[in-house]
Amino acid sequence: MKVLLDGDTIQARISELANEIEADYPPGEEIHMVCVLKGGFVFMSDLVRSMSVRVTMDFIAVSSYGSGTKSSGEVRFQKDLDSSLENRHVIIVEDIVDTGLTLKYLREILRSRAPKSLRSACLLSKRSRRKVDVPVEYIGFTIEDEFVVGYGLDYAEKYRNLPHISVLQG
Ligand code: IMP
């Protein structure tokens, strides 16, 4: 497997993203981070530890991929949030935005729960694969149309623990 982004490069970008996020919210406001499981857990964990404002967290699970590398376009809800989003500054934290279907669906559902604001942070974006237009306010890296694993991202549940991001070669 070819390393696309090593651990130090990822950490450096995450610090920048944390600074960007903090600068965008009024001082003293709490930010509620919603991690999309499973892939978002490593990014979420490093991102929140780079932030110094008040942060709360919750977790949501959706499935969009099955165990292959092709999107079915189908998104299923597997675990809902534990707490209300009403009147909170919410950031959805995702590993990667590919076709955009998952994020678009999630944004619609979460928007209907009346947050004060709703933004998205994705570590990776495959811009050329987008099927739907969906805003992503914070993007770590834009990558080519290649299937990547590591740093939370899996292939058939494997490789999530790699400290870097690699291209899975067929
Ligand atoms: P989307 O709905 O097509 O944007 O897909 C989003 C989800 O597909 C992500 O949260 C990932 O779980 C998965 N995914 C998309 N591309 C990759 C990849 O290159 N490696 C691993 N998972 C991916």
Image (spheres, rainbow, N blue to C red):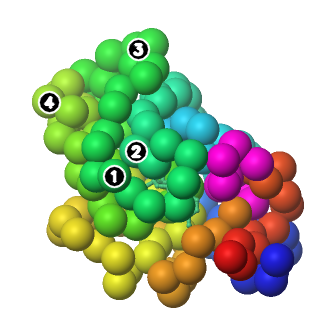
Q: Are marks 2 and 1 in contact (CB under 8 Å)?
A: yes
Q: Nearer the viewer, residue 85 or 105?
A: 105
Label 4 to label 2: alpha-carbon separation: 21 Å
- First in sequence, mark 2 or 3: give its number: 2
Label 3 or label 1, whichever comes before in sequence order = 1
x%, y% of residue 163? Answer: 85, 61
Q: Which residues are magenta?
A: 150-158
Quarter-of-image position of residue 81: top left
Q: Nearer the viewer, residue 46 or 59?
A: 59
Q: Are marks 1 and 4 in contact (CB under 8 Å)?
A: no
SS of the residue under disc 1: loop
Decide which of 70, 36 is in the foreground and name it.
70
Residue assigned mark 3: 83
Q: Nearer the viewer, mark 1 or mark 4?
A: 1
Mark linked to residue 72: 1
The kind of residue tagged 4 is Ser
Quarter placement of the N terminus: bottom right
